[in-house]
Amino acid sequence: MKLCYVVTTPDVTATGATAYSGPLEPFFRKLHALGYQGVELMVRNPREVDLPYIRKILSENSLEVALVNTGRVFLDDGYSLMLPPGERREEARQRILALIDFAAAVARPAPFGPQINAGLLRGRVAPGQNPAEAHAWVVENLKYVADYAAQKGARIALEPINRYQSNFVNNGEQAVALIRQVGMSNVGIQMDVFHMNIEDASFREAFVSAKAYITYVHVADSNRLAPGWGHLPFDEVFAILYEIGYDGYLTAEILPKPEPDLAARQAAEFLRPRTEGLRR
């Protein structure tokens, strides 16, 4: 497994709390020095990102882009896979296709290739909305963007999110069911142990039941701080990941506390010795 850290690109002006936000070049140097091999880029509008600059500082610091995070597309612009037919749906689709293009241009990490996630991007069922109708729209839109991603050699990573942040696809079992309904081989699952700790009765059962679909893993401790600063059983989690044959990125999506540099260091110092022995 390789280590990764979530950072925002400059087009993201209002970020969630679980990503580094600031000058990229010096932070990339620090991540490389700490032993990280990749970054997850939280992007809102790829047309506003300086792609040559991103490529340059990635290369200079021997970093890969493990995944393109799409959460701000929903939170800031209201675009989602749950939109019904109409102008807003077409705007959302075009934004998602642009994110796929961006991922394909900047990210080619083994073994899963370029990925964008679909966490909050799925949307939320609104009060009074017909859940079955909303579900059907997600399936239709996910098929559309996944077909485009396949043409680009890219994947969609469906992320189960806990019930306090989302009311649609909260656990791995629900994600597997949706993926089977969509029927696209390039749609996988992004597991996140922070959400799993809330929604799943057993880490083992959740990982094992979804193992055929898992292409990406987020880590944070029970309090959303760096692993090792809460009470999650990470040694058990790492053993399960090794057992199911997961060999992708292990990405810290954590609160940048007590301050960003120290949070990144705490995560690296905890994760690196525990994952190096699990690399194949």
Image (tube, rainbow, N blue to C red):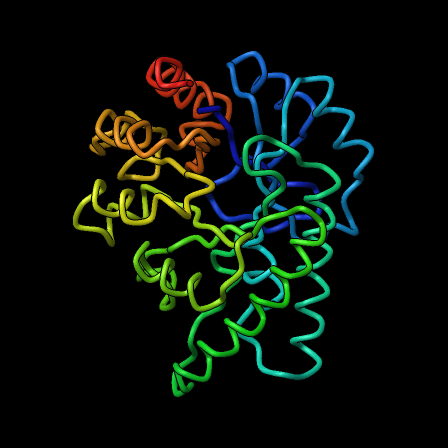
Q: Position of residue 174 (x, y in %)?
A: 33, 62
Is 7 placed above or below 76 here?
Answer: above
Q: Which residue does the image show at 60% across and 59% down from the upper left?
A: 146
Is 254 placed above or below 25 here?
Answer: below
Q: Which residue does the image show at 64% across and 61% down from the upper left?
A: 147
Where is the N terminus found, in terms of image quarters? top left
Is 117 placed above or below 139 here?
Answer: above
Q: Nearer the viewer, residue 245 or 224?
A: 245
Taking the image as shown, residue 96 lies to the left or right of residue 279, namely right
Q: Nearer the viewer, residue 182 or 164?
A: 182
| Residue lying at the far right of the rendered structure | 52
Where is the C terminus found, in terms of image quarters? top left
Q: Nearer the viewer, residue 78 or 103?
A: 103
Q: Position of residue 140 (x, y in %)?
A: 56, 74
Q: Quadrant of residue 60?
A: top right
Taking the image as shown, residue 9 lies to the left or right of residue 265, namely right
Taking the image as shown, residue 263 lies to the left or right of residue 152, namely left
Q: Position of residue 9 (x, y in %)?
A: 67, 41
| Residue lying at the far left of the rendered structure | 201
The count of marks equals: 0
Is 92 placed above or below 200 here?
Answer: below
Q: Position of residue 153 (x, y in %)?
A: 67, 46
